[in-house]
Image (cartoon, rainbow, N blue to C red):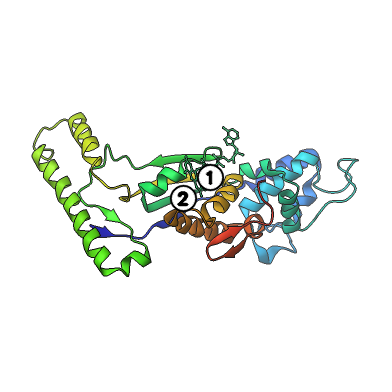
Amino acid sequence: MRSVEPQVFLIARPSVDYDAVAAYLTEVGGEAWLQKFDRGDLDSELADKGLNDPQNLAEFAGRLCYRSWEPGLNPNVTRVRVDQTEYLQNILASLHGSVLEHVSFSFALHNVSRVATHELIRHRPGVAISQESLRFVRLDELPFWFPEWAREDEELMKRATAVLDDLEAFQLWMADHFGLDEEGVPFHEKKHRTSFMRRFAPEGVATGLVWTANVRTLRHTIEARTADGAEEEIRLLFDKIGSVVRDEAPALFGDYVVENGTWTPRWRKV
Ligand SMILES: Cc1cc2nc3c(=O)[nH]c(=O)nc-3n(C[C@H](O)[C@H](O)[C@H](O)COP(=O)(O)OP(=O)(O)OC[C@H]3O[C@@H](n4cnc5c(N)ncnc54)[C@H](O)[C@@H]3O)c2cc1C
């Protein structure tokens, strides 16, 4: 048994091609919108803020809908919001959530249990999932997360560790018993046995997955999975995910009030 902590690695975020955006805006007459971003070759009042591709992508998608790059391009639009945070907050407030679907983040979730991943995969729209296969990957040890309150309980830890050590020893015994490391064992045979062996791993065994979600889904899952009644490991995980994405895109996640690990959005269900 190896004691582990669930970890969140943000491994991918959107990247905007500003030259392509500029070319498009030249077509529709919205070049002025781009002037406010610091591309290095443009004077910009926002230069000190740098570029935030996730936010810029969401804003771009929203403005395209109404041709609201600047007043007058659409005769129906006589005023436009200039400040990006204000603009995106209005997207959230008016439930125009589909524009948030263009913005996705990918995470490597490491040392998370099958308890957590089983709950995570219940969230269907706006996600992509690649999970470590315990049919292919043999368990030669059992990584396991213990919450702090459990770690403080000496008797519990002694008994829990003994159970896990027994299960781990059984994994090693089965691998030996099935001769999995002997010369010439075909891979399909290893896979067959490995899949049988995983049935004796606890649901708390730590594993991993790549989880990609768009901002609309992230907003919903952060709220649902940090709620008071949510399971403690997934709460911990989504508290971390929430903190990561709020740093990445404060205008898209800055409306949450976080209290005791519970993330409550100002604008729900976009
Ligand atoms: C605290 C907590 C306890 C839970 N307990 C249990 C439990 O005991 N047993 C259990 O089985 N599950 C349980 N769940 C899982 C829960 O029922 C949902 O399956 C899971 O949270 C996915 O969320 P969602 O339904 O919002 O769907 P998501 O897949 O996250 O979809 C997001 C939203 O898209 C819309 N949507 C998605 N798919 C459809 C669809 N097919 N039709 C119409 N609208 C759709 C809905 O508006 C939905 O809210 C629990 C979840 C939480 C947070």
Q: Amino acid at mark 1?
A: Ala
- How many residues crowd around disc 1 within 10 Å: few (fewer than 14), some, or many (20 or more)? many
State which tag comes first along the sequence, 2 or 1: 2
Q: Quadrant of the N terminus?
A: bottom left
Q: Nearer the viewer, residue 229 or 259?
A: 229
Can residue 212 be seen here? The reply is yes
The residue sitting at 62% across, 52% down in the picture is 53
Instruction: Name the spot of residue 255 as percent of width and height, x first.
Output: 66, 59
Identify whether 45 is placed above or below 214. below
The answer to whether the residues at label 2 and label 1 have Cβ atoms under 8 Å apart is: yes
Is 233 left, or right, of 31 in this rendering?
A: left
The residue under label 1 is 213
Q: Position of residue 30 (x, y in %)?
A: 79, 45
Above-or-below relation of 164 to 62: below
Near mark 2 (Cα within 10 A), the count class, few <14, some 14-19 or many ≥20, is some
Residue occupying the point 83% across, 49% down: 70
Residue type pointed to by label 2: Phe
Residue at image coords 36%, 46%: 114
Task: Dividing the image into four quarters, tell me where ligand 1 lies.
Answer: top right
**Residue 156: which disc?**
none
Element at badge 1? strand
Residue 191 % position (x, y): 22, 33
Looking at the image, residue 152 lies above or below residue 229: below
Q: Which residue is mark 2?
A: 107
